[in-house]
Image (tube, rainbow, N blue to C red):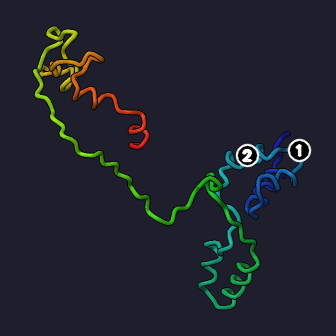
Amino acid sequence: MNWTDERVELLKKLWSEGLSASQIAAQLGGVSRNAVIGKVHRLKLSGRGRATATPARQKKASQGSTVQKSVARAASTARHVTTSIGATALQTQFDAEPVARHHIRPVENVVVPISRHLQLVELTERTCKWPNGDPLSEDFNFCGNEAAETGPYCKYHARVAFQPAAERRRSR
């Protein structure tokens, strides 16, 4: 399908009247809705049919009351077109502010162990391998306290590292 000058002018006219791309495609015949949308974008047609007066009409309206009445009549007879931007069907309106849920774990007698500040070469199977600090800095070290038999960390760091699944779900 070729876009002739007549068809382009008709497209511009129908677009300015506020017809949808599907309606324009049906009136033009032989083109799809997507072809109409593509041509509209290539022509950079942005304005749709407006219920308000154009700037030229507003200028004339300020010159006299009879002109104001005719502009008001033209505005009242103009077709009102509502437009939506984006996927408005998926947008949700919320009346209330969301309430942040803070899960406060019960306070227990938690004793944070004092780190032994071991270097990587000083670690054994029985020492806690919890890293302290930035690995790229000079003062990077590991906890080094006695590790539990079930993993690489001391009791304290094992509780920090391995949370029960139910507690992880609650914190989300």
Q: Going by the image, does 170 lie left or right of 85?
A: left
Q: Residue drawn at (38%, 39%), measured in percent from left and top?
A: 167
- Measured as percent of width and height from the top left, residue 87 is found at 63, 52
Q: CA distance from mark 2 to mark 1?
A: 14 Å
Secondary structure state at the residue bearing disc 2: helix
Secondary structure state at the residue bearing disc 1: loop
- Measured as percent of width and height from the top left, residue 33 is found at 79, 47
Question: Three-letter amino acid code at disc 1?
Answer: Gly
Q: Going by the image, does 70 lie left or right of 118?
A: right
- Mark number, residue 30: 1
In front here: 88 or 55? 88
Say if 16 sits above or below 171 in the image: below
In front here: 143 or 12? 143
Specify the quadrant of the image occupied by residue 162.
top left
The residue wearing badge 2 is: 39
- Measured as percent of width and height from the top left, residue 108 is found at 22, 42
Say if 138 sits above or below 19 in the image: above
Specify the quadrant of the image occupied by residue 67.
bottom right
Q: Residue drawn at (89%, 44%), measured in percent from left and top?
A: 30
Question: Three-letter amino acid code at disc 2?
Answer: Lys
Say if 44 sits above or below 61 in the image: above
Residue 28 makes an appearance in the image: yes
